[in-house]
Image (cartoon, rainbow, N blue to C red):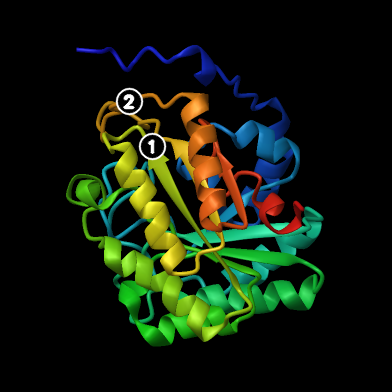
Amino acid sequence: MENFSIKPEWLNKKIHLGSCSEIKSLLRAMLLETVCEQALCPNIGECFSRSHATFLILGRQCTRSCSFCNVIKGKPSLPDRGEPARVAEAVKRLALKHVVITSVTRDDLADGGAGIFADTVSNIRKNTPQMTIELLIPDFKLFLDSLRAVAESGPDIVAHNVETVPSLYRSVRQGSNYRRSLCVLDVIKKISPRIKTKSGIMLGMGEKEVEVIAVMADLRVMECDFLSIGQYLAPSKFHYPVKEYITPEQFAYYKEKGLSMGFSHIESGPYVRSSYMAQEYLWKK
């Protein structure tokens, strides 16, 4: 049996946290969270040093139990109605040009938290109207009113990650549904065709190449514009285990294949995450 605790040479990225103290201090002072910290993202030092952060709204506790994710599971607190204004102020202080807003899944709320997403966009637009805004949303159980509230709030990108291939959903994404995730992207695009839609998939969970290609084809049927492809790295020994380390050459192959299918932009590599280099999707020509 192969020992996946020993990483290959292409997964030797050094994580530098020395440059993170200033942005962390700002976030704590404003009572704000980032998924960068909660999900133990390996790119945190690089992104924080550039004043890039993905804000995590609607609390720290998630109502679902995905086996790959390090975000806390449990009973969430009530939504903080002042959070959207604080996120907007932090965005302004950090002088961001592109911001990503995501959340835990809030199945306990009637709208899944869509109203807080919309309020956050509204507050950012008031403070920094030139900002490009990306929302990385849960599936909202495919409630049309929630998806409409998000789309009509005016983001530039709406992302929803399929995360893995359908054959692994029962093991990896408990409480989620592959077809429902595809429909989220489809509904957003139909409500507001001007919005760019985006999804992401992690590799190394035991998926087959043909399954990855099939997921990309499914996303294009939904007119998904952007795609991120990265290596799954288990946050701990208690999470879903890594089954394979994907080579850089294979990531390059998937990128080439996806672009030939019609995706406008793809980030594909071992350390790629949904929000990594997020500004590149809109700005890179």
Q: Which residue is mark 2?
A: 244
Q: Which mark is residue 203?
A: 1
- Category of crowding for the residue at label 1, using alpha-carbon neighbours closer than 10 angstroms: few (below 14), some (14–19), many (at least 20): many
Q: Position of residue 13 (x, y in %)?
A: 58, 21
Nearer-N-terminus badge (2/1)? 1
Residue name at image x 65 percent, y 42 percent = 24
Q: Quadrant of residue 112?
A: bottom left
Q: Position of residue 265 (x, y in %)?
A: 62, 52
Res 281 visible: yes
Q: Determine whether the residue tagged by mark 1 lies in a helix, strand or loop.
A: strand
Tag 2–tag 1 contact (CB < 8 Å):
yes
Q: Determine whether the residue tagged by mark 2 lies in a helix, strand or loop.
A: loop
User: Left or right of 45: which side holds 35?
Assistant: left
- Relative to 99, does residue 83 appear above or below in the rendering? below
Q: Amino acid at mark 1?
A: Leu
Q: Position of residue 236 (x, y in %)?
A: 33, 29
Q: Amino acid at mark 2?
A: Glu
Residue name at image x 58 percent, y 49 percent = 275
Res 81 visible: no
Residue name at image x 30 percent, y 48 percent = 165
User: Left or right of 22: which side holds 170?
Assistant: left
Q: Quadrant of residue 76?
A: bottom left
Q: CA distance from mark 2 to mark 1?
A: 8 Å
